[in-house]
Amino acid sequence: MIALALVTLALSSPVARWVDPQFGPILATPKHQALYTWNVERDFKIHCRRACAQAWPPLVVKRAVPKRIAGITGTFGTIRRPDGRLQVTFNRRPVYTYAHERPEQVLCNNVNGWFVVKLR
């Protein structure tokens, strides 16, 4: 029964570890879309709203995520967005995808303060 619960949790995780050929291990969605943080949000608050959030869609979930996810070093959590939705955080920083990227692409690292989330 415990093994089944762990498998269910792993399958429903909103994030995954993916190895990009250029950046190495990065944080991504389960479909391998790269996740980013924005340097403007170093204060652990949401500043990417409206047009910003259209270009940089936040990774949102319906309920809180576990603090630890197998295979990924770091702490996960959620933050409430101004529209009321819950956004995933990694090491207290909100994470986003980039709307113009396909899975397994990293096009916007170090662009206007956006950085792909590199893992150890």
Image (cartoon, grey):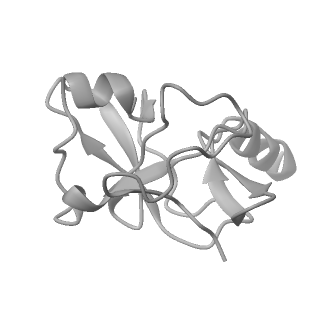
Q: Image point 69% across, 43% down: which residue?
A: 9
Q: Residue at x 40, y 52 (%)?
A: 111
Q: Quadrant of residue 39?
A: bottom left
Q: Name the side, left or right, on which 45 lies relative to 14.
A: left
> Looking at the image, which is closer to me, 117 or 110?
110
Q: Is residue 114 left or right of residue 47?
A: right
To which quarter of the image does residue 87 belong? top left
Q: Position of residue 102 (x, y in %)?
A: 66, 28
Residue 101: percent from the left, percent from the top? 59, 30
Q: Position of residue 86 (x, y in %)?
A: 32, 34
* Quarter placement of the C terminus: bottom right
The quadrant of the rendering that contains the N terminus is top right
Q: Nearer the viewer, residue 69 or 83?
A: 83
Q: Nearer the viewer, residue 2 or 77?
A: 77
- Tell me if 94 is positioned left or right of 68 in this view: left
Please tell me whether residue 14 is drawn above or below residue 95 in the rendered image.
above
Instruction: Count numbered badges in the picture.
Output: 0
Residue 50 as seen in the image, left or right of residue 23: left
Q: Residue at x 53, y 71 (%)?
A: 74
Q: Is residue 71 above or below residue 86?
A: below
Q: Where's residue 94, x and y in %? A: 34, 51
